[in-house]
């Protein structure tokens, strides 16, 4: 597990998550979006399979088929979900 911050521009909010670096990005996107919806008592606009996650620090978008480990994401990094 790694601890990262995830920025969601549509809500203009930053969230802190402990994520399994072995999970595929597509699974993480689904889990993160569900948790944010529960916390904010709202629905994120768009279909979950159209969301994109990337690294703010490394300035790249993640392929949903890969894991955070494959991108060498470490504790404390900032990610973005759009």
Image (cartoon, grey):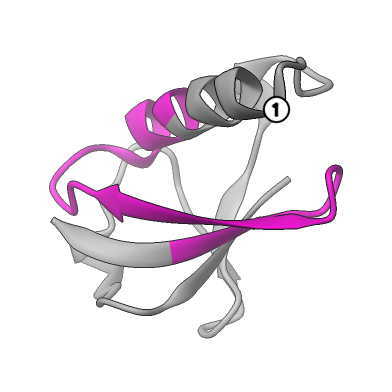
Coordinates of residue 41 in the picture (x, y in percent):
71, 17
Q: Residues within 10 Å of mark 1 (few under 14, many from 20)?
A: few
Q: Nearer the viewer, residue 40 or 18?
A: 40
Which residue lies under the disc numbered 1?
A: 40
Coordinates of residue 42 in the picture (x, y in percent):
77, 17
In the rendered image, the quadrant that contains the N terminus is bottom left
In the rendered image, the quadrant that contains the C terminus is top right
At 30% from the left and 72% from the top, the residue drawn is: 73
Position of 43 relative to 70 (above/below): above
At 24% from the left and 75% from the top, the residue drawn is: 72
Position of 57 relative to 20 (above/below): below
Position of 61 relative to 66 (above/below): below
Coordinates of residue 13 in the picture (x, y in percent):
74, 55
Q: Is residue 37 magenta?
A: no
Q: Is residue 4 left or right of residue 29?
A: left
Quarter where residue 57 is shown: bottom right
- Which stretch is magenta? 5-31
At 82% from the left and 53% from the top, the residue drawn is: 9
Q: Is residue 62 left or right of residue 22?
A: right
Q: Is residue 21 magenta?
A: yes
Q: Is residue 38 left or right of residue 44?
A: left
At 56% from the left and 28% from the top, the residue drawn is: 33
Position of 34 relative to 25 (above/below): above
What count of labels does the image hold? 1
């Amino acid at each position: 597990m790694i601890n990262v911050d995830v920025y969601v521009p549509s809500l203009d909010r930053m969230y802190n998550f402990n994520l399994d670096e072995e999970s595929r990005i597509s699974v993480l996107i689904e889990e993160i979006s569900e948790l944010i919806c529960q916390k904010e008592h709202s629905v994120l606009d768009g279909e979950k399979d159209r969301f994109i996650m990337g690294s703010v620090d490394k300035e790249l978008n993640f392929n949903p088929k890969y894991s955070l480990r494959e991108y060498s994401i470490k504790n404390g990094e900032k990610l973005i979900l759009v």
